Amino acid sequence: MADHSETTTTRDALDSLRTRFARTLEAARGPAPTPTPTASASASPSPDPLPYADDLLRRWQEPQRHYHTVTHLTAVLDRIDTLQEYADDPDVVRLAAWFHDAVYLPDRSENEDRSARLAERALPEAGLPDAKTAEVARLVRLTVSHDPADDDRDGQVLCDADLAILAAPPSAYAAYAAGVREEYHFVPNDVFREGRAAVLRQLLGLPRLFRTPHGAKEWEATARYNMRAELDLLSV
């Protein structure tokens, strides 16, 4: 019974994500052009969003993932909902969230660029205008540095949503750190500790982790506390 319940819960969660993707893509496409009398017969409907959602969800459930899973995707989307008032185009930011870790192999260093290129291939086919596709790809590549410009409102929202896990309660932060370590299980402990510490120092060296007013107020101090605590543990 427990296994059946868990399967049902997972199926419901995935169905909810499919619906969210479909709504986001349809909103980002904008209203369909009104067909003229001569063009109406040849006009083709917009592609069905669900096959694209299913492909992305398949990617987000790959076995090498332990932190970068559909749980992370859902959390980022939820945070974008919280921060949407600060974005210029919240639906484009949501699409960037869907793609930002769509390609994820822990032993590769070009995941963000490969994820952006996936967006550049898939989204025009899915009916997204070229300019919005380019913006999605730019935002995905921005997650390499998590350092958006002061006037980059969409970039600030995506980066804040992606980094919000750093401000999680202690148990959730510990689970996040453990998930990241499991993804890099093939890396020796001393090498991993050195690399992880370098990532934490890079983030702590940013003048601000969070650029939106909400993120700065609600998440900045806790995130820095959590990262310093992890850095202390890595140094033991």
Image (tube, rainbow, N blue to C red):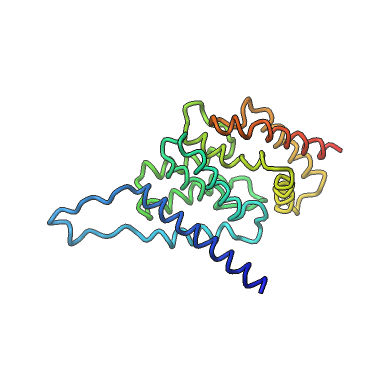
107 left or right, relative to 90: right
Which residue, as the protein is rendered here, is positioned at the far right?
A: 236
Query: Where, by quadrant of the figure, is residue 9 drawn?
Result: bottom right
Spot occupied by residue 35 in the image (x, y as percentages of width and height): 19, 54
The residue located at (61%, 33%) in the rendering is: 218
Q: Is residue 152 above or below residue 54?
A: above
Which residue, as the protein is rendered here, is positioned at the far left?
A: 37
The residue located at (82%, 39%) in the rendering is: 233
The residue located at (67%, 33%) in the rendering is: 203
143 left or right, relative to 199: left
49 left or right, relative to 15: left
Spot occupied by residue 13 in the image (x, y as percentages of width and height): 55, 60
Q: Is residue 67 above or below residue 139?
A: below
Which residue, as the protein is rendered here, is positioned at the far bottom?
A: 1
Question: In the rendered image, which quarter contains the N terminus?
Answer: bottom right
The residue located at (63%, 35%) in the rendering is: 219
Count numbered badges in the picture: 0
Question: In the rendered image, which quarter contains the C terminus?
Answer: top right
